[in-house]
Image: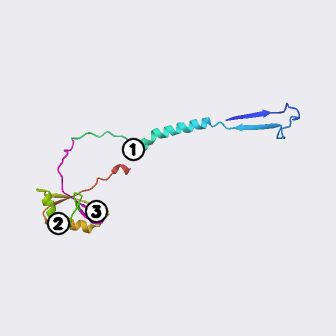
């Protein structure tokens, strides 16, 4: 910090008295340039280290054989939160779901069942019962749990 002091004791009429306001006056000025420098350095350090704190340690996992992509359309029965049924994004009646699966997907012996997590169990159970009566295997679609956030 830089302080400047102006002594007016040598001037006429001042008499060297320090108590008078006009005789001696201390001017204080704060130099903020070092403060700005420190803040900018801290900002740069924070910006460089923030991504490390968010993502943790980077690990290169081994590569595995790629999964075969298929253009084949599979039967997916979706149950919305309100209980509405869809067969591959098209609305379908629960009484016609088995016949629609066999008509649209000839030779298919299994059906993927996807339901909203907030759906009550009754519509899910009704669909499972209807598909079991039609001798179709049911494969429930789930999402893998993200274990990286549980540290």
The structure residue drawn at horizontal position 14% and vertical position 66%, both measured from the top left corner, is: 133
**Could you tell me which secondary element the residue under label 1 belongs to?**
helix
Q: Residues within 10 Å of mark 1 (few under 14, many from 20)?
A: few
Marks 3 and 1, how far apart at CA: 34 Å
Instruction: Point out the image quarter for the N terminus.
Output: top right
What is the number of the mark on residue 96?
Answer: 2
The structure residue drawn at horizontal position 18% and vertical position 58%, both measured from the top left corner, is: 111
Question: Which residue ends up furthest to the left in the rendered image?
Answer: 107
Estimate the x, y position of residue 54 in percent, counting from the top left.
42, 45
Q: Are marks 2 and 1 in contact (CB under 8 Å)?
A: no
Q: Are marks 3 and 1 in contact (CB under 8 Å)?
A: no
Q: Which residues are magenta?
A: 66-85
The colour mode here is rainbow
Q: Residues within 10 Å of mark 2 (few under 14, many from 20)?
A: few
- Choose top left, top right, bottom left or bottom right for residue 25: top right
Task: Identify the residue under disc 1.
Answer: 55
Mark 2 vs mark 1: give the one in front. Answer: 2
On screen, residue 66 versus residue 34, left or right, reads: left
Marks 2 and 1, how far apart at CA: 48 Å
Q: Is residue 131 above or below residue 3?
A: below
The residue nearer to you, when weighing 87 against 140, is 87
Q: Is residue 30 above or below residue 99?
A: above
On screen, residue 85 versus residue 102, left or right, reads: right
Estimate the x, y position of residue 100 in percent, counting from the top left.
15, 62
Mark 3 or 1, nearer chain start: 1
**Could you tell me which secondary element the residue under label 2 belongs to?**
helix
The structure residue drawn at horizontal position 43% and vertical position 43%, both measured from the top left corner, is: 53
Q: Is residue 105 above or below residue 29?
A: below
What is the number of the mark on residue 80?
Answer: 3
Mark 3 vs mark 1: give the one in front. Answer: 3
Q: Residues within 10 Å of mark 3 (few under 14, many from 20)?
A: some
């Amino acid at each position: 910090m830089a302080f400047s002091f102006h002594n007016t004791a040598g001037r006429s009429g001042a008499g060297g008295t320090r108590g008078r306001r006009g005789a001696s006056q201390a001017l204080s000025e704060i130099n903020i340039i070092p403060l700005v420098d420190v803040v900018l350095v801290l900002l740069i350090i924070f910006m460089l280290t923030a991504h490390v704190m968010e993502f943790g340690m980077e690990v290169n996992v081994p590569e595995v054989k790629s999964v075969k992509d298929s253009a084949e359309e599979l039967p997916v029965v979706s149950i919305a939160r309100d209980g509405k049924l869809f067969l591959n994004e098209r609305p379908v009646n629960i009484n016609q779901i088995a016949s629609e699966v066999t008509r649209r997907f000839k030779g298919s012996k299994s059906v993927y069942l996807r339901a909203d997590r907030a759906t009550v169990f009754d519509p899910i159970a009704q669909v499972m019962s209807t598909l079991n009566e039609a001798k179709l295997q049911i494969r429930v679609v789930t999402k893998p749990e993200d274990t990286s956030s549980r540290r």
